[in-house]
Image (cartoon, rainbow, N blue to C red):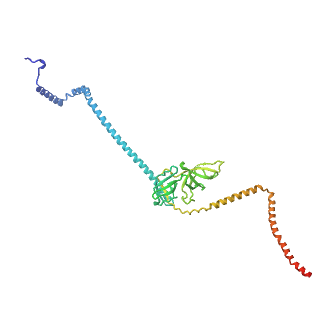
Amino acid sequence: MEIPPLFKQGASARVRVTVFALLSVVMLVVDARMHVLGTIRQALATALYPFQTVAMMPRDAANTISDSLVALNTLQKENRELRQQQIVNAQLLQQERLLAAENAQLRKLLEMQQKVPVKSIVGEILYDARDPFTRKIILNRGSQQGVEAGQPVIDEVGIVGQVTRVFPFTSEVTLLTDKAPAIPVQVLRNGLRSVAYGRGKTGSLDLRFMPANADIQKGDVLVTSGIDGIYPPGLSVASVALVETRSADSFARIVCRPLAGIDRHRQLLILLVEQNLPPRPQPDVIDEKSAKLFKRRLRDSTRDNSADDANATPKDKPAEERKGTASQATPAAAAAAPAPAAANAASAAPAKPAAKETSR
């Protein structure tokens, strides 16, 4: 039976493999020896490049997507790490700035401590007082460190306040701008003395009861006068910010701004000034009943004098004086008149027996 042409077989597979292998070896040898296949190879590569590109597109797309995802994850991780590092660096920078400012403040306090002639210690502010209507702070120095009530507190510029209450390990300081304290000051330019009072939350000071013609100008520096025996003389207190004078007022309105860092610093200097002032004299104790009696007599005498002055005229006053003199002389004459009558009666009584004897 004849095999159909479709199913006819040519040379066997083994023969074909052998032939193609020998052909390949020959082409390799010829190409290596004579270099005659370079042009053919380049032409085939050029012709097949578009097909290679199309065939490689899925692989390149997959690699690009994978690389993009990996790069995105890497960038996000690095971004998180850099942000955390930035936060840490910012905190360190803030701490460094705070430490630098604190160091500068402590250096200035050390220089001020060397300038002040009295013994002093450095105190740190713990917190503000709980009373919102006062200007007070709490320091970490108390009676165990030698702090006493009444001692002044300063910074590197000038007066900050005064110690008002002392505890074993803490102390309460009333700031200069509180309404309670008053500090004797003088103008540095001309030595004019006055007393500065705080104004509370406004953070300023007043010079009260200063005459309208007082020699004080805007910009004058006020320093402690030292006449109170508490604050050392020459410490800066405030500068004059406002001077107002009115023709209808007897006193000028003078507003001052404190020079010290009232609410800016954390460390302050406590001057350990010894309070050697003499005790205040005791006030005179007056009995309440005696005081009322004295007031009543004084009121009655004032009322009588005013009534006499209102009723009497200038012409009547000499007549009254003469009348008073005559009235005083009449009783004296009446008292003196019986004396001669008694004397006459006494002299006439022994004369009668003498007459009888003569008649006998």
Quarter of the image where the N terminus is located: top left
Q: Quadrant of residue 360?
A: bottom right
Q: Quadrant of residue 288?
A: bottom right
Residue 314 percent across, percent down from the top left: 79, 57
Residue 212 percent across, percent down from the top left: 64, 51
Of all residues, the one furthest to the left in this rendering is: 1
Vertical arrangement, residue 4 with respect to residue 335, above or below: above
Query: With 90 as the anchor, is 64 left or right in this view?
Result: left
Q: Residue at x 12, y 20 (%)?
A: 7
Q: Residue at x 27, y 32 (%)?
A: 62
Of the pair 121 and 116, the residue shown nearer to us: 121
Of the pair 135 and 231, the residue shown nearer to us: 135
Of all residues, the one furthest to the right in this rendering is: 359
How many numbered circles are shown? 0
Of all residues, the one furthest to the front in this rendering is: 360
Of the pair 70 and 351, the residue shown nearer to us: 351
Residue 268 percent across, percent down from the top left: 48, 55
Query: With 139 as the anchor, is 328 left or right in this view?
Result: right
Query: With 73 as the anchor, is 176 left or right in this view?
Result: right
Query: With 100 as the anchor, is 355 left or right in this view?
Result: right
Q: Residue at x 28, y 31 (%)?
A: 61
Residue 9 percent across, percent down from the top left: 11, 21
Vertical arrangement, residue 226 with respect to residue 92, above or below: below
Q: Residue at x 88, y 79 (%)?
A: 353
